[in-house]
Amino acid sequence: MKKMLNTIIIFAAISLSFYLISCSAGESFDNEFYPLQSLISIPDITEAQRAEFNPNVESEFTSVIEEDGSEFSGYKTNNKVFLEKVIAPLIKPHLSQISQMKQTEIINYFTLFSFEIYQRYFGKSFYRWGGDILDLDDPQEKGVRNKFAYGLDCSGFVASPYELAVYFGLMKEDETLFASKGYQKYCLANDKQDIGGREGSSNNYRLDTQELAELGREVFRLEKGQIPTMEQIKLLQPGDIVGRSGHFGIIAELKGEPYYLESGGWVVPKNGGIPAYAFEALKIFASSGSISVRRCLD
């Protein structure tokens, strides 16, 4: 009897572990929004894909040497492999159609697509400290999920639609200040040093919240505790970034209305992991400190 009970317990534990994995990287998105966009169909995840790309895949410990001789050790992300093996094959058949869109429409599609595909593969909370879609960031010694291979931090997610637009040749570098290559051109043209890496070192022009809080032009600003007006909400357009040094999210259009999306933070996670209506999101965000809405597109 005791042996049978132990067997049942072990079986239950194994079943639970598989359930947790399936819930974190294959969750059901049965609500009014999903799929977030209709152009790029995201198929069911195959078993081979799930084995290679899931939130529990760990990164290898590595070291990098900067140009000044500084050495940093830690764990790098592997998001670019996910981009090349999963994202690119889904997007490439639609490039001709996407290329006919306005810039704001391109960024909107890629924002919604990035958010949804990362959620489907890596869970509703796909945050990973030091995670960007091109793996530009330094290896990380510490931070939320720093030992795992996949995931985006807040600035990594905000930059991802701009990075994709440049990666697929849909937008020019000088048109995409919120992408690494656009930021690199900006730095070179304005004699600005890239200091977003560890201990103030270069970070391969990978944008962090400190840079995002200064780049582009300010559409409007909310001071701590200030509630946005409907006139301000009407000013929002896809690709606008929202936040302050420390955390940023991004605006996208859903069903003709502006919504706020983010990785990490305290708005979308508390909204069940789904995009939050912009008015409510900005109201919540500004309740803890001043925030700025910034834009790099016309």
Image: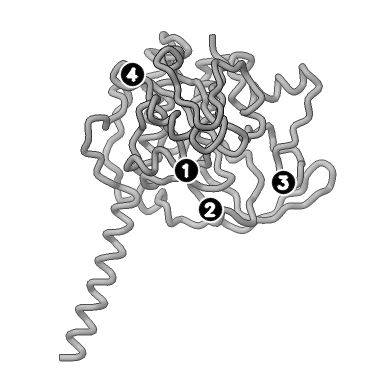
Label 4 to label 2, Cα distance in Å? Answer: 32 Å
Circle 3 residue: 198
Q: Position of residue 223 (x, y in %)?
A: 56, 27
Looking at the rendered image, the disc whose residue lies closer to the viewer, 4 or 2, is 4
Name which of mark 4 and mark 2 comes first in the sequence.
Answer: 2
Q: Quadrant of residue 67?
A: top right
Residue at disc 1, secondary structure: loop
Q: Residue furthest right?
A: 68
Q: Residues within 10 Å of mark 2 (few under 14, many from 20)?
A: few
Circle 4 residue: 257
Label 1 to label 3, Cα distance in Å? Answer: 20 Å
Q: Answer yes or no: do the residues labelled 1 and 2 have beta carbons within 8 Å?
A: yes
Label 3 to label 2, Cα distance in Å? Answer: 16 Å
Name which of mark 3 and mark 2 comes first in the sequence.
Answer: 2
Label 3 to label 4, Cα distance in Å? Answer: 38 Å
Q: Amino acid at mark 3?
A: Arg
Image color mode: one colour
Q: Answer yes or no: do the residues labelled 3 and 4 have beta carbons within 8 Å?
A: no
Name which of mark 1 and mark 3 comes first in the sequence.
Answer: 3
Q: Is 30 or 229 nearer to us in this picture? A: 229
Q: Amino acid at mark 1?
A: Gly
Q: Is 269 or 90 nearer to us in this picture? A: 269
Q: Amino acid at mark 4?
A: Glu
Residue at disc 2, secondary structure: loop
Name which of mark 3 and mark 4 comes first in the sequence.
Answer: 3
Q: Answer yes or no: do the residues labelled 4 and 2 have beta carbons within 8 Å?
A: no
**Residue at left 23%, top 78%?**
9
Q: Is 166 or 233 nearer to us in this picture? A: 233
**Residue at left 27%, top 65%?**
16
Circle 2 residue: 144
Q: Is residue 46 left or right of residue 178?
A: left
